[in-house]
Amino acid sequence: MFDKKAARLRRAKKTRAHIRFLGVHRLTVTRTPKHMYAQIISPSGGEVIAQASTLDSSLRSGATGNTDAATSVGQMIAERAKAAGITKVAFDRSGFKYHGRVKALAEAARENGLEF
């Protein structure tokens, strides 16, 4: 039987296997109906180097589930990555379509200095 979440996780697994083969830092994005989360994970997969989400106090005041909030998270994760000395990452969209909030976050991160 078709399960929407299982299909998304299957797509994510394929992408993550390729990124692990490349051995680069990974910018992973997770979205829920109310919030957006972004993390930069080390090539070994065992350490979170930088993170940003709409749960941060500076972003929590406004709407947290729209493309404006996703753009803010993208800017924040790019700034925190540069502070940690990371400029090049692989984009892991976690099986979500590259559309809407995921696309807004990715474009904001690119505009603020992350390369992927």
Image: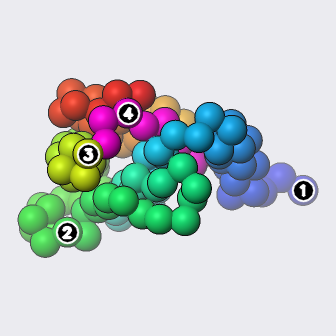
Which residue type does callout 1 highlight?
Met
Residue 90 showing in the rendered view: yes
Which residue type does callout 2 highlight?
Asp
Q: Residue at x 71, y 49 (%)?
A: 13
Structural distance between the alpha carbons of marks 1 and 2: 38 Å
Determine which of the numbered discs, if any, sits on residue 100 in the image: none
Q: Which is nearer the eye, 2 or 107?
A: 107
Mark closer to the chain start, 2 or 4: 2
Structural distance between the alpha carbons of marks 3 and 4: 10 Å
Q: In the image, which is nearer the foreground, mark 1 or mark 4? A: 4
Mark closer to the chain start, 1 or 2: 1
Determine which of the numbered discs, if any, sits on residue 88 in the image: 4
Query: Do the residues bearing badges 1 and 3 touch, measured as CB atoms within 8 Å?
Result: no
Dot 2 corresponds to which residue?
56
Dot 3 corresponds to which residue?
85
Which residue type does callout 4 highlight?
Lys
Q: Which is nearer the eye, 110 or 82?
A: 82
Q: In the image, which is nearer the foreground, mark 1 or mark 3? A: 3
Tell me if mark 1 has few (under 14), some (14-19) or many (20+) residues whose alpha carbon lies within 10 angstroms of its own. few
The magenta segment is: 86-96
Residue 15 showing in the rendered view: no
Q: In the image, which is nearer the foreground, mark 2 or mark 4? A: 4
Compared to residue 16, the image places residue 3 above or below, namely below
Structural distance between the alpha carbons of marks 3 and 2: 21 Å
* Label 3 element class: loop
Q: Residue at x 42, y 63 (%)?
A: 48
Mark closer to the chain start, 3 or 2: 2
* Label 2 element class: loop
